[in-house]
Image (spheres, helix red, strand yellow):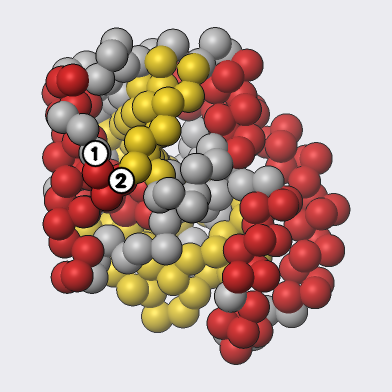
């Protein structure tokens, strides 16, 4: 099962989701989102995974790279290849299918619960959240989860293959989450996060999050047709 993973150069880490994909027979092939190939030139793709990014999908200066990745996702779905999106990847996927994304009035930082209509494909958590931007699910999608800030998960079957997206981060390991905090600690502190407590909570929750991420990945694969 050849899985193509779209990521930034510094963000090539599919974490617990990638780990479970590999356990299920997946072979992860990373692609740089700012230099995507023609989708039809990929070798036997089984699934497309769009990871997070420091980019904001709604900002005009990122228009070209967002348009390229959106078309890449549509090409995959039209070719019968299912797509999974996480955080920024969920925002791009929403835009590719006719939704949108925006800067939220406040960031979501830390371990947060989500309100869900489908506890299998969008368990309530708590899940790791580190983002300032949100998606609005496409009009063709089924919204699965929300938070006080906005939409959190959707599925869509309008383009020939199935798609699933989560705004939260099921994939993130403790090391990666703490690295993100370390990179921009002043921002998180200014937003009211106790960064020391957040690091400690992240370490404490890692084993449970790994198990939850593996279970969610399995559920998503079943939905996507594997």
Report x, y in % for residue 3. 41, 22
For this rendering, which residue is in front, 26 or 163? 26
**Residue at image point 68% right, 46% down:** 173
> How many numbered dots are placed on residues in this image?
2
The disc placed on residue 33 is: 2
Taking the view exactly as shown, the residue that stands out farthest to the bottom is 190
Q: What element carries label 1?
A: loop
Q: In which quarter of the image is the N terminus?
A: top left
**Residue at image point 80% right, 61% down:** 201
Q: Can residue 125 be seen in this view?
A: no
Label pair 2/1, CB-CB below 8 angstroms: yes
Residue 186 lies, with reference to residue 9, above or below; the image says below
The disc placed on residue 63 is: none
**Residue at image point 50% right, 43% down:** 12
Q: In which quarter of the image is the C terminus?
A: top left
120 sits to left or right of 152: right
> What residue does disc 1 label?
36
């Amino acid at each position: 099962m050849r899985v193509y993973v779209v990521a930034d150069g510094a963000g090539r880490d599919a974490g617990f989701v990638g780990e479970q994909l590999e356990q299920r027979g997946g072979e992860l092939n990373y692609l740089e989102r700012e230099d995507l190939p023609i989708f039809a030139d990929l070798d036997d793709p089984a699934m497309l995974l769009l990871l997070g990014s420091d980019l904001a999908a709604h900002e005009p200066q990122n228009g070209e790279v967002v348009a390229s990745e959106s078309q890449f996702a549509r090409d995959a779905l039209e070719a019968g290849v299912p797509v999974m999106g996480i955080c920024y990847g969920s925002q791009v996927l929403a835009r590719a299918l006719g939704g949108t994304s925006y800067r939220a009035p406040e960031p979501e930082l830390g371990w947060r619960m989500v309100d869900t209509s489908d506890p299998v494909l969008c368990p309530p958590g708590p899940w790791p959240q580190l983002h300032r931007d949100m998606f609005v699910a496409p009009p063709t999608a089924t919204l699965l989860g929300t938070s006080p800030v906005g939409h959190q998960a959707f599925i869509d079957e309008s383009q020939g293959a199935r798609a699933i997206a989560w705004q939260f981060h099921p994939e993130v390991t403790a090391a990666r989450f703490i690295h993100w905090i370390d990179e921009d600690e002043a921002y998180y502190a200014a937003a009211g996060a106790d960064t020391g407590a957040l690091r400690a909570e992240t370490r404490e929750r890692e084993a449970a999050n790994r198990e939850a991420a593996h279970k969610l990945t399995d559920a998503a694969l079943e939905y996507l047709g594997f």
